Amino acid sequence: MKRVVVIGAGGHARDTAWHAEEVNRARPTFDVLGFVVSDLTRLSVRDSPVLGDESWIDAHRRELDGLVLGIGSPRVRALVAERLSARFPELEWPSIVHPSVLLDWDTATIGRGVLLGAGVIGTVNVRVEDFAVLNPAVTLGHEAVVGACSVMNHASGISGGTVLEREVLVGTGARVLQYRRVGAGARVGAGAVVTRDVPPGETWVGVPARPLDR
Ligand SMILES: CC(C)(COP(=O)(O)OP(=O)(O)OC[C@H]1O[C@@H](n2cnc3c(N)ncnc32)[C@H](O)[C@@H]1OP(=O)(O)O)[C@@H](O)C(=O)NCCC(=O)NCCS
């Protein structure tokens, strides 16, 4: 069993811990010790068993095998992963793959610290880079790429050959059509249908998706 703590204590952290327990139901893999937060003073959800702040990891690093990110924001995932990897280089970042995930495992490339949620379906030659999140019911077409720290929310989908660069957010139910590229740090709104390439850092919404007019 890998002894892990979940970083974060909000909704995505609880989702992540549940996915780890689901993995355990199929094959005992994770001993989830609890949740650790960056800043105890900003804790808004109090029903999770919070062990402490990051100093708790320092004090218990010999009793731990790895860390799991429970953060749903792409940018914050990137910052926290970078900070904790530098501070605790000996700890692993295991990926959590729900037993129901359906992919061509012979051709898939899955990085570390990834969450593949319940009911994710992909086909051949997909690549999911480090610390990316595919929430439940996400779909990936052939050769789709999900960049590092990108987050695809529930029931969103990207078609064949589509590339999400790093730290992209794809909102719930959104679709990105085939062979499109979504630039680093861009956000695709819930329910959008992306028919063109999205430049880095932009937010696009609607059907067909257009830049959000501020
Ligand atoms: C697109 C998004 C990233 C924009 O967030 P934001 O910058 O905080 O934008 P705001 O909420 O301030 O909304 C700005 C405007 O865009 C509109 N808007 C927001 N999201 C939209 C969407 N998905 N589709 C269409 N219009 C949207 C708002 O109605 C608002 O319009 P108004 O100025 O005419 O009132 C966000 O709304 C979104 O869709 N995030 C994904 C949510 C998601 O996946 N949730 C599931 C979690 S599991």
Image: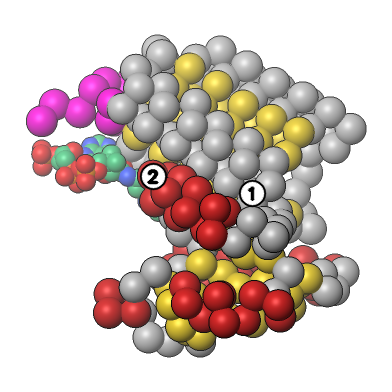
Return the residue at label 1. 114
Indicate the quadrant where residue 97 lies: bottom right
Q: Nearer the viewer, residue 106 or 2?
A: 2
Majority secondary structure of magenta residues: loop
Q: Is residue 118 visible?
A: no
Q: Is residue 80 visible?
A: yes
Q: Is residue 132 above or below residue 6?
A: above
The structure residue drawn at horizontal position 85% and vertical position 37%, both measured from the top left corner, is: 105
Toward the left, the furthest residue is 214
The structure residue drawn at horizontal position 27% and vertical position 79%, both measured from the top left corner, is: 41
Label 1 residue SS: loop
Cα separation, mark 2 vs mark 1, equals 15 Å
Residue 107 % position (x, y): 84, 28
Query: Is disc 2 surrounded by few (<14), some (14 to 19) or many (20+) residues within 10 Å?
Result: some
Q: Is residue 27 above or below residue 196?
A: below
Q: Amino acid at mark 2?
A: Arg
Return the residue at label 2. 75
The structure residue drawn at horizontal position 49% and vertical position 26%, both measured from the top left corner, is: 165
Q: How many marks?
A: 2
Residue 108 % position (x, y): 79, 32
Identify the mark nearer the N-term, 2 or 1: 2
Q: Which mark is residue 92?
A: none
Does residue 149 show up magenta in the picture?
no
Residue 21 % position (x, y): 71, 73
The region drawn magenta spans 202-214
Q: Nearer the viewer, residue 82 or 96?
A: 82
Residue 212 % position (x, y): 20, 28
Report the side of 16 relative to 4 (left or right).
left
Q: Amino acid at mark 1?
A: Val
Q: Are marks 2 and 1 in contact (CB under 8 Å)?
A: no
Q: Quadrant of the N terminus?
A: bottom right
